Image: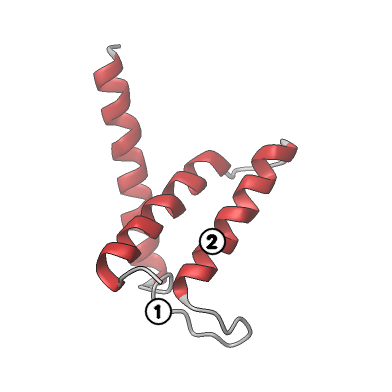
Amino acid sequence: MSITKAISEECNQIYEMLVAKNAAYGNSVFEPINVFAKTDWENQINTRIDDKLCRVSRGSEYPGDDTILDLIGYLILLRVGRKLYGNK
């Protein structure tokens, strides 16, 4: 397999995951209900990124989770949010 094809497959996997999660959860990343957490979408994404980085640094992962894939997804969502809703 070529590097170009491998990159394409990884990017497609991330795309499919983000689209599927958005369909399942709605726009909850950018429009949180703020029942307990009273922070904006960007701070909530940053918290999730911190959690994922903590798991990566400790080498701990829940069975069935792909922490690296989730981390990449949240980083993309952070960029999308900043593009659509502006930067703080």
Classed neighbour count for the residue bearing mark 1: other residues with Cα under 10 Å, few (<14), some (14–19), many (≥20): few
Q: Quadrant of the N terminus?
A: top left
Image position, residue 69 (x, y; %): 48, 42
Return the residue at label 1: 31
84 in relation to 57, above or below: below
Q: Between residues 82 and 64, which one lies in front from this camera angle?
A: 82
Q: Taking 30 as reference, is 57 left or right? A: right
The residue most toward the bottom is 35
Q: Is residue 41 left or right of residue 12?
A: right
Residue holding disc 2: 46
Total marks in image: 2
| Marks 2/1: CA–CA distance | 15 Å
Check disc 2 and give the amino acid type: Asn
Q: What amino acid is found at the position of numbered circle 1 in the picture?
A: Glu
Q: Are marks 2 and 1 in contact (CB under 8 Å)?
A: no
In the picture, measured across the screen, residue 55 lies left or right of residue 2, that is right
Secondary structure found at label 1: loop
Place of residue 64 in the rendered image (x, y in percent of width and height, measured from the top left): 60, 43
Nearest to N terminus: mark 2 or mark 1: 1
Q: Residue at x 37, y 51 (%)?
A: 76
Circle 2 or circle 1, nearest the eye? 2
Mark number, residue 53: none
Residue at x 30%, y 30% (from the top left corner)? 9
- Residue found at x 55% / y 54%: 49
